[in-house]
Amino acid sequence: MTPAENPTAEPELSVLLGPDINLLSTRMHIAEPDMNVRLERYAGDMARWMAPFGNAPLDAAIFACTGSSYLVPPANAPGRFLDHAGRHMPLISAANAVSDAVTALGARRLVLVSPYPESLTAAAVKWWTAQGLDVRKVLSVPPAASGHPIYSRDARAILCTLQLAARMEGDVVLALGTGAPSLSALAVASPDADIPMLSSNLCTAWAASAALGQPSSPLDWLAASASWRQRLHDRFPALMASLQN
């Protein structure tokens, strides 16, 4: 499940998830001009968003929308499980997945790379602070000249921001947002970084794989030998070549 306008979640998750995992997707659409209102409403109607899957034999569900969790009270945020079509299954929300990965790394000090507008960035900082973590620095990705306030961010701009974030004092760099094209930027920036770099989609794939019986450490996903790196190059060769020049 991902917002209707999100151009990034499915392609990045399909690259990240292993060859034995089949990814199905549906789009969450709400006719509301205010982005933050849409994000809040996405979190409140899981049955509606799951309905298009019908009786498909699902083993887990992914809520690929980090921003929703930042804006709603904890009681209204996506939980850890859901019931659909007679099945009780794990629900992997992007925000919970990133939080779980941070916990698995034993990280306390965060450097946030945000593709969000100011109001959503502030909500994200508040959410991470409420998790008992120390947000040491927030770096905003420069916005595009036009287009969606999150999804029009450019991979080159994210790469430059990640490279700057790697020089900040912290235990981990978090590239926020399932809709920002951060995986290619992370693939280029992370090998030279002294601290781990995580993205919303990378953590979501890590958590989904664990829920499907393939547990691992987040550090395994950041290794130079991680299998998704080659899949990313194979899927987006022109993009990867442009970022490495």
Image: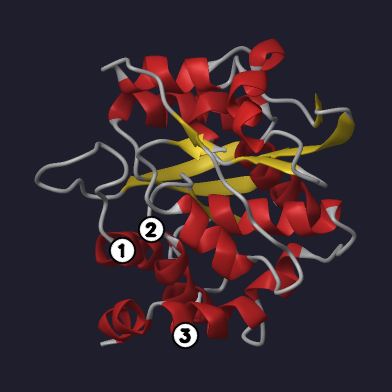
Task: Provide the secondary structure element on which disc 1 rests.
Answer: helix
Residue at horizontal 44 percent and vertical 45 percent from the top? 137
Question: How many numbered circles does the render carry?
Answer: 3
State how far apart marks 1 and 2 are (Cα).
Answer: 5 Å
Q: Is residue 29 above or below residue 112?
A: above
User: Which residue is at a point 58% across and 21% down the rendered structure image?
Assistant: 43
Circle on res. 181? 2
Q: Amino acid at mark 1?
A: Ala
Circle 3 SS class = helix
Q: Which residue is mark 3?
A: 234
Horizontal and vertical percent for residue 221?
A: 68, 71
Name which residue lies at 56% across and 15% down.
Answer: 72
In the displayed structure, does residue 76 sit left or right of residue 216?
A: left
Spatial distance from mark 3 to mark 1, Cα to Cα? 17 Å
Q: Which mark is residue 155?
A: 1
Near-viewer residue (214 or 96):
214
- Relative to 193, residue 46 above or below: above
